[in-house]
Image (tube, helix red, strand yellow):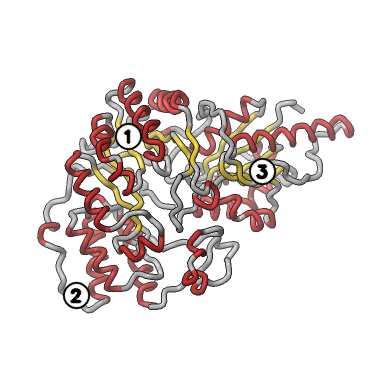
């Protein structure tokens, strides 16, 4: 037996990106002496992979940063366990600690949330020490009986980050690319300059883990990670912080240094509406350093819903940001959770009308017209009595508190809108075509079949709106 020990890190879905959630811990584990294999099941079919890395592993860890990733990990688990039942099984990422009880029922030995790299190394070293002890005693390679987890379930420790190790990842060409105004697709890299968030939006899955705190990744690590991805062919970088302006000084220094080193490189970021207003003077900083677009989780265009979600902005704030971004020559990519228990058929039509009136049809990814609210374990939405009264008991396998709309027609509309989006993306319809079909569907539902999209929004598609080929959602 090699004294190194063997670890397998598995990602099932990370929004079409080459997973930072594998590359970062892979570097930590390799530095600790592990032989690490990284598997990205969003790009590699499990059935087509050689079984040996999984079968021979001493430590297997699933990265579960979001709802979809966790559901897919659970689906893959029986196959993984069929190949290897002796390895210590770990789940790490935002959705791990809030679903601890369910994941332990499925056989998880170690659950890690928050700043997980140190915990992964600690868990792996436990396995290696115990394995060596058993091997010395019995002359075998067997992993010993499980022990209770000494690592914290959630760690917010300030870690000394190291350069992510991407050596055995699928190439960037396998991942989502940028549709650029030039017409030539661009390969996209991904990195993070910070984690967590200092805000407490009620629906956000980050909040139960970080509870209003965030952690900085040092500038030199961020820039080195970008540098290695540029060398691997990246022409555009997604800086995937939950809110890039949580640490405004850190953010501005990074994009300045990035642009100085790679003047032709473009990038995108995610920033809250309230931060775009607060730091409006830096919109031009973003533009001048190569930012093509800013994603912002707007969620709703109804002030009453925004208040329930504790978003920290209003519809008027959003319209101000739309104009500020246009004045700065920066594309805004709003995201929404539009189907909530508080939307009505008429309210959904008003949402579409506002999108059209603000000339945002081309800037809103079609999936954002059809996303339904998820209420996961630990959600601060459960602080609201009206939410507690409307949800069914927690569905462990579904990872949510189920809810149904008081008006069944709204749930039907949501399903129909999702079907249009799915069909449209499969058939490669334009964003405007998908929007128009959903517009007709919604207005027909309220008896306004003849209602036309506002004339000022009917013009030619904006040829200059850049976007990633895999839309942002969880």
Horizontal and vertical percent for residue 436?
A: 21, 62
Mark 2: few, some, or many residues within 10 Å (few <14, many ≥20)? Answer: few
Mark 3: few, some, or many residues within 10 Å (few <14, many ≥20)? Answer: some
- Residue placed under numbered mark 1 in the picture: 267
Residue drawn at x 43%, y 62% is 373
Residue drawn at x 68%, y 35% is 122
Q: Assess whether mark 1 and mark 3 are in contact (beta carbons under 8 angstroms).
A: no
Residue projecting furthest to the top: 261
- Residue placed under numbered mark 2 in the picture: 449
- The mark found on residue 152 in the picture is 3
Label 2 SS? loop
Q: Is residue 297 above or below residue 228?
A: below
Horizontal and vertical percent for residue 77?
A: 63, 51
3 or 1: tag closer to the N-terminus: 3
Horizontally, residue 442 falls left or right of residue 409, namely left
**Disc 3/disc 1 C-alpha distance (Å):** 35 Å
Displayed quadrant of residue 276:
top left
Label 1 SS? strand
């Amino acid at each position: 037996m090699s004294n190194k020990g063997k670890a397998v890190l598995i990602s099932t879905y990370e929004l079409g990106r080459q997973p930072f959630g594998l590359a970062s811990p892979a570097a930590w584990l390799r530095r600790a002496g592990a032989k690490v294999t990284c598997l990205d099941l969003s790009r590699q079919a499990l059935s087509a992979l050689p079984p040996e890395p999984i079968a021979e592993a001493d430590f297997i860890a699933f990265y579960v940063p979001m709802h979809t990733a966790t559901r897919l990990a659970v689906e893959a688990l029986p196959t993984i366990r069929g190949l290897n039942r002796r390895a210590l099984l770990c789940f790490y990422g935002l959705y791990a600690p809030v679903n601890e009880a369910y994941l332990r029922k499925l056989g998880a030995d170690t659950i890690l949330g928050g700043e997980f790299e140190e915990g992964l190394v600690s868990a792996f070293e436990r396995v290696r020490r115990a394995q060596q002890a058993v091997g010395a005693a019995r002359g075998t390679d067997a992993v010993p009986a499980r022990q209770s987890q000494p690592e914290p379930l959630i760690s917010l420790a300030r870690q000394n980050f190291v350069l992510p190790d991407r050596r055995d990842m699928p190439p960037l060409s396998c991942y989502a690319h940028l549709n650029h105004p030039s017409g030539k697709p661009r390969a996209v890299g991904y990195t993070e300059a910070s984690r967590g968030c200092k805000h407490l939006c009620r629906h956000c899955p980050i909040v139960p883990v970080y509870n209003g705190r965030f952690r900085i990744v040092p500038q030199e690590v961020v820039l080195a990670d970008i540098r290695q991805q540029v060398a691997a062919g990246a022409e555009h970088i997604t800086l995937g912080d939950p809110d890039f302006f949580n640490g405004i000084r850190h953010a501005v220094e990074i994009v300045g240094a990035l642009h100085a080193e790679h003047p032709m490189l473009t990038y995108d970021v995610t920033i809250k509406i309230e931060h775009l207003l607060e730091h409006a003077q830096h919109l031009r900083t973003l533009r001048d350093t190569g930012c093509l677009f800013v994603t912002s989780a707007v969620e709703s265009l109804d002030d009453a819903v925004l208040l329930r979600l504790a978003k920290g902005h209003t519809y008027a704030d959003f319209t101000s940001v739309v104009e500020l971004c246009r004045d700065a020559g920066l594309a805004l990519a709003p995201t929404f959770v539009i189907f909530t228990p508080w939307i009505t058929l008429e309210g959904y039509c008003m949402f579409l009308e506002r999108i059209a009136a603000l000339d945002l049809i081309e800037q809103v990814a079609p999936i954002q017209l059809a996303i339904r609210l998820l209420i996961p374990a630990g959600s601060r939405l459960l602080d609201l009595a009206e939410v507690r009264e409307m949800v069914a008991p927690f569905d462990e396998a579904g990872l949510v508190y189920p809810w149904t709309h008081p008006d069944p027609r709204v749930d039907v509309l949501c399903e129909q809108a999702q079907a249009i989006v799915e069909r449209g993306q499969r058939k490669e319809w334009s964003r405007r075509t998908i929007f128009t079909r959903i517009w007709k569907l919604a207005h027909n539902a309220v008896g306004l079949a003849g209602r036309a999209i506002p004339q000022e929004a009917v013009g030619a598609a904006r040829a200059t709106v850049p976007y990633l080929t895999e839309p942002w959602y969880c």
